[in-house]
Amino acid sequence: MNDQADQSIKGNDNSAEELSAGTMKERVLSAFPAFRSRNFRLYFIGQIVSMIGTWLQMVAQGWLVLEMTGSAFQVGVVAAASSLPTLFLSLIGGVIVDRYNRKTILLWTQSFSMALALLLGIFTLTGAVTVPIIIMLAFLLGCVAAVATPAIQAFLSEMVERDQLHSAVALNAAIFNASRVIGPAIAGLMIAWIGTGGAFMVNGLSYVAVIVALLAIHTATPRAKPFVHQPPLQSIRDGIVYTWEHPLIRTIVLFVSVVSIFGWSFMSMLPVVAKQTFGMGSDGMGYLFSAFGLGSLSGTFLVSMSSGRIRTSAMVIGGILVFSLGLTAFTFATDARLALGFLFISGIGMLSAFATMTATVQRLVEDRYRGRVMSIYLMVLMGFMPLGNLQVGFLSEQFGTAVAIRIGSIIVLLATAFLFSYRKEIQAAWREYREDRQDKGE
């Protein structure tokens, strides 16, 4: 009798454990519905490996240029070269994505990126690398990214069901932020162990993961692509006109342009801060990048958890204020541990604001304009960064890195104050625009 009771109890315990595991799995899938898709699970694993490698190369590249030249301005020039193509090619990239198979585009772009990374590694390991070579390869990699970035955004809708798309977009952003934490930390250690050339080679090999994942992904016949028969320039023009005439989207795009130039630019100066301000090696530089990345990752979850509870305007303005004040405090920090803390706080603020703005644009834009508007948004967000990298590098040479970063932070604060003071006028313009569209039956 007792043995039977024991067995019954054990059986019930096992059932409880299985039930608990099943419940936990269901909770994760409920929180992240995109993981129900086999395609997205493959993409997620491959892309996070590849993105870690990308951040590894970005950090190693800045460190290599600083060691070769000792110039903060040259570090800014190389950073600008990698993001400059986005300013000129992202709209064309959007047209390409609308006209050709997106999976095929991604396979080609990832393969080209792998070849460029390996080539930079070979040049570095053989001692043949020069700053002009680094700039040229960084520029070519930026050209590839100008096509790959909108292709990734568009391919998400083909990998998952419609009700999983919001989750897929959020998790895709989480890949970027998680890799920003892991990549720089690995980069600092890897540069110390195998040098910058070895780091570039590792990045090249990391593309294998996403290429294999893409080959294993099977999607249905691609949906009909709009505007295939419309002249590309006309399609681009229509998207620009729609973006400019929409009062809220226009405001967000203009504000993003200011933050992209004067806010994000401090990232290209972190190698300079690590070496010249705190006397750190490559590992310490990796910690600085990771501190901001960890804050950014926290900001992503903060936006997700507060969705619908905090007003959009409050999240954007509050996030930018936290970022600007945290970054300003960072420029005054004399202790490395305090600097890491301020960077963490800045990351929370920056990503809270940007994740909210991106989600707002996605929510407001009409479906027929979505691809072109998001291309414009990405062009401003990423394409204006080279201007920021150049200005912060120039100011660093003239007045010092801390002052250069501080100036950018103050400009972002002023732009935020301006946005806050005109919030009622912007809301009134939005109401008038919406009523006008309704009257026209659009």
Image (cartoon, grey):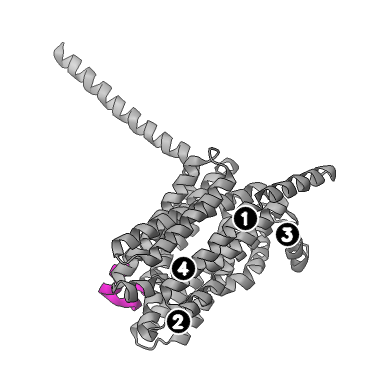
Observer-nearest of 60 and 21? 60
Compute the Cα span from label 4 to label 3.
31 Å
Residue under pointer 1: 419
Amino acid type, callout 3? Trp
Compute the Cα span from label 1 to label 2.
31 Å
Residue 344 placed where, x, y %? 38, 56
Observer-nearest of 51 and 327? 327
Magenta stretch, overall SS:
helix
Category of crowding for the residue at label 3, using alpha-carbon neighbours closer than 10 angstroms: few (below 14), some (14–19), many (at least 20): some
Range covered by the magenta-colored residues = 187-201
Compute the Cα span from label 3 to label 2.
37 Å
Q: Earlier in the sequence, mark 1 or mark 2?
A: 2
Residue under pointer 4: 406
Give me the disc on residue 244.
3
Q: Earlier in the sequence, mark 4 or mark 1?
A: 4
Compute the Cα span from label 4 to label 1.
20 Å
Q: Is residue 435 visible?
A: yes
189 inside magenta stretch: yes
Give me the disc on residue 397.
2
- In the image, taking residue 363 as reference, residue 33 lies left or right, namely left
